[in-house]
Amino acid sequence: MKEGILIIDKPAGMTSHDIVDVVRKKLKTKRVGHSGTLDPVATGVLVLLVGGATKLFSKFVHFDKAYEATLRLGVITSTGDCQGKILSEKDTSRITQAQVRDVFASFVGERQQVPPMVSAIKHKGRRLYELARRGIEVERKARAIRIYELNILRMELPEVDFYVKCSKGTYVRRLGEEIGEILGVGGVISRIRRMQLGPFLIEEAIPLEEIDEHHLRAWTHP
């Protein structure tokens, strides 16, 4: 029986479930699941569990994560990313790099974050993103998260490339919105790439088109 984990470099434009479907066909097995959702706009580390390894799902949900992303200031969308409907646009010409650096620095540490409506969290048995697609918004409780690192990699306003290492339950699109809100101009995530999930790094991720059963590996993390 095919069994183990696959570390995939997820391409943009596909849902995590789309990836599962592709791998099921490639490996000719139905018992495949993913360890945590990545948005269609996102790329990078996606761990799939195959065969008996699907029982390990609970081991993965507590892992810290790391991302590289691009924040575009001055735009607010319905989803918090570049794929949503534009709700407003604001002038960013008065925003300085020093202001941006100060706001980024203020987010490091423990904080409360309200999950976005376009998330996989369930509300009365329905995924929030399913409700959002129907134009329904419900109250969400803030959750405790931790930002371990938040470093600016490039700043050419209104765009900011950054690296973030964070705890489970952290939504990068919401982080971008919060930064934009504090700066008074709004913001959306236009690019996001997961660089790390727990012990799994982007350097060991395999492109989806190259995946086969020889890439299956045992999970030995305690």
Image (cartoon, rainbow, N blue to C red):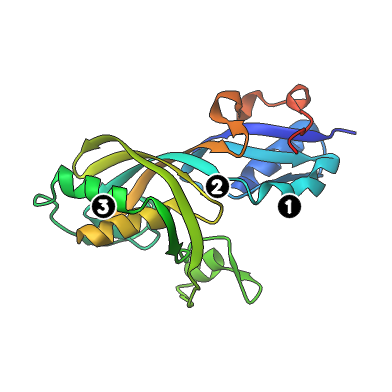
| Few, some or many residues within 10 Å of mark 2 (<14, 14–19, 20+) | many
Residue indicated by mark 3: 103
Say what amino acid the circle numbered 3 marks: Val
- In the displayed structure, 18 sits above or below 184; it is above
Q: Earlier in the sequence, mark 2 or mark 1?
A: 2
| Few, some or many residues within 10 Å of mark 1 (<14, 14–19, 20+) | few
Residue for point 73% across, 52% down: 58
Indicate which disc residue 11 carries.
none
Residue indicated by mark 1: 58
Say what amino acid the circle numbered 1 marks: Ser
Task: Specify whether residue 185 is in view.
Answer: no
- Separation of disc 2 and disc 1 at Cα? 17 Å
The quarter of the image holding the C terminus is: top right
- Separation of disc 3 and disc 1 at Cα? 34 Å
Q: Position of residue 221 (x, y in %)?
A: 73, 35
Q: Residue furthest right?
A: 1
Secondary structure beneath dot 2 equals loop
Q: Give the label, 3 or 1, closer to the camera.
A: 3
Residue for point 46% across, 75% down: 137
Secondary structure beneath dot 3 equals helix
Q: Position of residue 196 (x, y in %)?
A: 54, 36
Q: Earlier in the sequence, mark 3 or mark 1?
A: 1
Q: Position of residue 65 (x, y in %)?
A: 54, 43
The quarter of the image holding the N terminus is: top right
Q: Nearer the viewer, residue 26 or 53?
A: 53
Residue indicated by mark 2: 38
